[in-house]
Image (cartoon, rainbow, N blue to C red):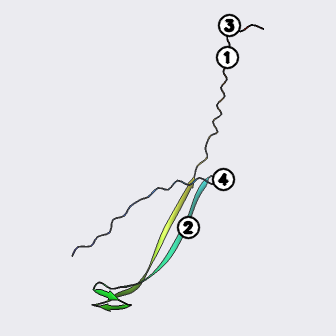
Amino acid sequence: MACWAQRRRSAFFIKPLDVLPPPGVYTDQISIDWTWNLCPGIGLLGLCIGITNAGTGSSVITVTLIVSPQNIVVTMSGATTWDPGERD
């Protein structure tokens, strides 16, 4: 049986509701502790017929948030309506 892991990069776009953080790079780590107890055979009423796969593990995920400044774009438009058939 072959087992392999593939490293992937994911992009998430977050739009804050009220307060914008100052531009910069923010980095943190998320630690996750895993505990599992799997029954690859037949499981019934909390009992496992077969060899139970149980164990623990931990993972550390590094998260980097890049906040970039965004230029403000102001768009102004106007429309004039004139009806040549209407006179004052």
Any mark on residue 85, and which? 3
The quadrant holding residue 74 is top right
Any mark on residue 38, and which? none
The residue identified by callout 4 is 20
User: How many residues crowd mark 2 within 10 Å: few (<14), some (14–19), many (20+)?
Assistant: few
User: How many residues crowd mark 1 within 10 Å: few (<14), some (14–19), many (20+)?
Assistant: few
Any mark on residue 28, and which? 2
Residue at mark 2 to residue at mark 1: CA–CA distance: 57 Å
Which dot, 3 or 4, sits closer to the camera? 3
Q: Amino acid at mark 2?
A: Asp
Secondary element at tag 4: loop
Which of the two discs, 2 and 4, labels the residue nearer the N terminus?
4
* Up/down of 2 relative to 85, above or below: below
Quadrant location of the N terminus in the rendered image: bottom left
Residue 25 in picture, x, y percent from top left = 57, 57
User: How many residues crowd mark 3 within 10 Å: few (<14), some (14–19), many (20+)?
Assistant: few
Any mark on residue 81, and which? 1
Which dot, 2 or 3, sits closer to the camera? 3
Q: Are marks 2 and 1 in contact (CB under 8 Å)?
A: no
